[in-house]
Amino acid sequence: MVIWVDADACPKVIKEILFRAAQRESVTTTLVANQSLAVPPSPFIRTLRVSAGFDVADNEIVRRVSAGDLVVTGDIPLAADVLEKGAIALNPRGELYRPETIREKLTLRDFMDTLRGSGIQTGGPPPLSQRERQEFARELDRWLAQLKTNQ
């Protein structure tokens, strides 16, 4: 099992949590982006640079992900795709995407996209809070603990 990170939009503080966990638990963690990324030297931390373009990084993650892998993403369509492949999807704010609620999240996302497309200002997400960082770390630790149990 490995961790895949949709790295283009992943907050730096979340990447740092992932780097520490990868090193501590010896879990391969691959950051996928369409730009060069600075990562600490580690046999467990990798980068995969893809060409620029709409959903290129997302499509590469979906192509490579396996059942049981963890995907860190705030992208709801990507989360839906990896859930269909049996992977776990975790938002950088600490929310686990669930198969039973992902369609609802996709519908809301599409609705908000339609509003923005018609010129309505919907605003962006608030800054990442300390509580959300802690929730992310807690969910990551749960996945890592389950990984150890299944080995």
Image: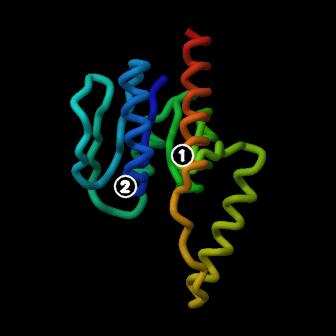
Q: Nearer the viewer, residue 115 or 53?
A: 115
Q: Mark 2 or mark 1: name the one nearer the start of the chain.
A: 2
Q: Is residue 19 above or below residue 6?
A: above
- Label drawn at residue 88: none
Image position, residue 81 (x, y; %): 58, 47
Could you tell me which residue is drawn at 65 percent across and 42 percent down?
A: 96
Q: Nearer the viewer, residue 92 or 113?
A: 92
Which residue is situated farthest in the top direction here? 151
Image position, residue 27 (x, y; %): 41, 22
| Residue picked out by circle 2 | 8
Could you tell me which residue is drawn at 40 percent across and 21 percent down?
A: 24
Image position, residue 36 (x, y; %): 22, 50
| Residue picked out by circle 1 | 133
Could you tell me which residue is drawn at 51 percent across and 63 percent down?
A: 127
Q: CA distance from mark 2 to mark 1?
A: 18 Å
Image position, residue 109 (x, y; %): 64, 67
Name the kind of residue labelled 1 in the image.
Answer: Arg
Q: Is residue 107 above or below residue 33?
A: below
Colouring of the image: rainbow
